[in-house]
Amino acid sequence: MKKFSLLLIFIFTCHFIFLNYTNIANATDRISTNSLNDNNYAKVCKNSYGFYYTYDPYLYNSWTGKLTPRIFIIKVVPQSPAANAGLVVGDEIIKINDVKVNNLTANAVFNILQNNTTTTFDIESNDIKKILVMTKTDVCLAEYNDNIDELFDKSWYQISNFNIDAAIEYLRNCTLIENKLSKKFINSELSGIDNQIRYWMPKKNQFKIGYDLCKNNSKSSEETYACIQELVNRTIAQVMNDKSVEQQQALLLQQQQLQQNQINAINNYSYALQNQHLQVDQNVNYSGTVNANIYHSGTINTNSNSNINAHIWNY
């Protein structure tokens, strides 16, 4: 469980400007057509409470004037401790073991659920508050497994450990509670995950084509392994080149944004001089010179840094 979650925790700078709810849903629906083969599903049992949740750190609290983290349930496994206790999609976790969620980091929440076999949850469900006590049991469900074979899995893992299918499911589940999530969470973190899917899905499909050619055209196992390893090296080189191009584009975008910010700052300053933020004190001295003292208020910040943490949690 911990490995599954950590695979989906990443920090990146998101250059995607805006992604609305419909685009997220369409993206997952489009990609999910690759997951229709029942033979690719395997029964997996894990000791857990049987629910999936998302941690949104960007929700604004009008009472405190601060951002307040909140946790929402995005999936409940049937016949699990969570389902039997009455937990449903859309419920909000207010407290965990009598500790308020807004006092906990995402990692702290994960560690509590990881290290406790019995946990008490204060839940708010449709404005109704309730307390649920859950004890972990073996929860079994069908999980999608796209491993073509062990060699393919090991070869692709050298290139990327991003779990495409888990990310698709996460996005789809988040659309069920989109009205509860902050716009910043959706437009930055969820769109960032969507970008990762869009990048890695065609890369993996292309790798599969090359992998099949290596297996079908090689005359010996040694030749097959050599062909596949060469394919791995080429793909890694492509990924590194993509990152280099992306960094150059990001730098160019940053420079353009800085220039635009400077232009905006000058325009704002000019506007201030011409309108409300102008006080001119003209004093003419005996020699005929003029002293013009101009006072203006307001500060302009042209520096913008965006660090995005995408937390995808399940338990």
Image: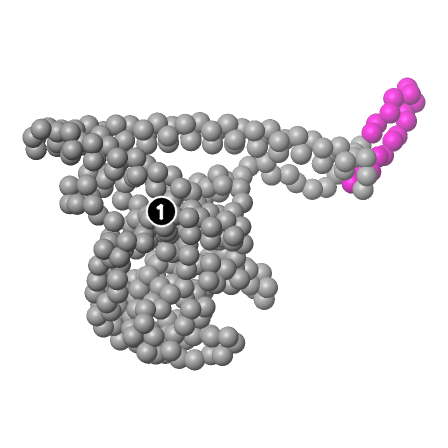
Tag 1: Cα neighbours inside 10 Å, few (<14), some, or many (≥20)? few
Residue 162, x across and y down, in percent: 30, 45
What residue is rendered at 24% in x and 69% in y? 139
Query: Could you say which quadrant of the image residue 13 lies in?
Result: top left
Residue 304, x across and y down, in percent: 54, 39
| Range of residues picked out in magenta | 277-292
Residue 234, x across and y down, in percent: 25, 27
Answer whether residue 105 is visible to the viewer in this image. Answer: no
In the image, is 5 to the left or to the right of 53?
left
Q: Describe the colour scheme in one phrase.
A: one colour
Query: Could you say which quadrant of the image residue 243 lies in?
Result: top left
Per the image, the residue denoted by label 1 is 10
Q: Residue furthest top?
A: 287
What residue is rendered at 41% in x and 75% in y? 122
Q: Nearer the viewer, residue 80 or 311?
A: 80
291 magenta-colored: yes
Against 192, is 212 above or below?
Answer: above
Identify which amino acid the numbered label 1 is placed on: Phe
Residue 123, x across and y down, in percent: 43, 74
In the image, is 93 to the left or to the right of 144?
right
Q: Quadrant where the C terminus lies?
A: bottom left
Against 210, is 298 above or below?
Answer: below
Against 125, is 75 above or below?
Answer: above
Answer whether residue 89 is visible to the viewer in this image. Answer: yes
Residue at disc 1, secondary structure: strand
Q: Quadrant where the N terminus lies?
A: bottom left
144 magenta-colored: no
Q: Nearer the viewer, residue 223 or 84?
A: 223
What residue is rendered at 49% in x and 41% in y? 16
